[in-house]
Amino acid sequence: MMKKIILFTVLIFVVTTTIFGQTPVKKKPTIMCVPDRNWCFAKGYKITFKDETRGVSKENPDYRKALDYDPELKEALAQISQMFNERGYTLKNIETQLNKVEEKRARAATAGAYRGKEVALNPYNDLMQQAKADILINVKWKVNTIGPARSVTITLTAIDAYTGDEIAPVTGTGQQKTTPELSILLQSAILSIIEPLQTQMQTYFDDLFANGRKINLNIMAWDDINLEDEECNGKSLYDLITEWMEDNTKNGAFKEDIANETEINYVETRIDFFIEQRGKMRASDAKKFGKVFEKYLETTCADFNISTKQSGLGEVTLYIGLKE
């Protein structure tokens, strides 16, 4: 009888702790493993994209070429992804995301052809927008050979996918082994650094989740508008914009990088992880934040044309001009 009472008491304690006293499980970032930018360039895996809006050409890593021509890359990405998956992370597969991007680009090109114009798309930004990972893990490695033994030195660099900020670069070398299997050498090298990398990533992500995701927001004036002189709702556009930012960023956190008559650049702008759309809470990003701002300005400032252009997953630009 006493054993039954003790067992019942233990069960009550377990259930009560589970329901009422359980320590909340930390939300983990969604990650995507990608080959390191400089590693791609050194291998010749690069593509040039012409940014028509800014009139400049940029070189981006050609991830598709890297995956098609470097079988060791797939092996390395698979090993890293497996280890993070075992630790409870949600992973986005780069090859799957590239396939989706290419399908969208094909549809956009077809639509552009029907309209008699070409559609210019930034392949890197398209991939980031499609995957919507919180953190990228840039991967590069080299094989070390000493006599019959080999080892792998690997560098994994965690990057904020929204801002490009470096979170944690970690380098480690695995044990020397005589095996010819690259997967075994990679596994040993990854195991030597995955715990400190995971700790630094989680610390960074906990800060984002508590204090807001980071984005960059640009305001560009055209039609000879002066942001400091032009008025809307009884205030200068500059003051109106500043007040909105103070009220709608997470804890009023943002920094002015540039502020003059025709341009304002806000960096380290903190926004909530989720935003209400059509009665539901949805994951937020720079584009959605910019659209909310655009709607506010359109409603408040009837004399102006407002448009929004996304420059990347974590960057958006609002253009303000006079209505004709």
Image: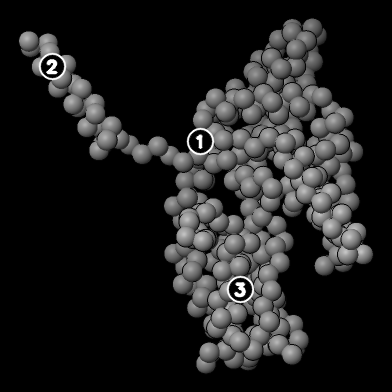
What residue do we see at 71% from left, 29% from top?
A: 77
Q: Secondary structure at mark 1?
A: helix
Neighbour class for label 2 at 10 Å: few (<14), some, many (≥20)?
A: few
Q: Which residue is mark 1?
A: 199
Label 2 to label 3: alpha-carbon separation = 63 Å
What residue do we see at 70% from left, 62% from top?
A: 310
**Eye-nearest disc, 3 or 1:** 3
Q: Amino acid at mark 1?
A: Thr
What residue do we see at 43% from left, 39% from top?
A: 26
Residue 8 on image: x %, y %: 15, 19
Label 3 to label 1: alpha-carbon separation = 38 Å
Residue 254 on image: x %, y %: 54, 66
Nearest the viewer among 142 and 23 is 23
- Residues under numbered marks 2 and 3 in contact, where contact means CB atoms less than 8 Å apart: no
Residue 218 on image: x %, y %: 66, 70
Q: Which residue is mark 2?
A: 6
Neighbour class for label 1 at 10 Å: few (<14), some, many (≥20)?
A: few
Q: Which residue is mark 3?
A: 294
Can residue 289 be seen from the camera position used here? Answer: yes
Of the two numbered discs 2 and 1 on the same chain, state the one appearing first in sequence: 2
Can you tell which quarter of the image residue 147 is in? top right
Can residue 56 be seen from the camera position used here? Answer: no
Of the two numbered discs 2 and 3 on the same chain, state the one appearing first in sequence: 2
Q: Quadrant of the N terminus?
A: top left
Residue 235 on image: x %, y %: 53, 89
Classify 4 as above or below 51: above
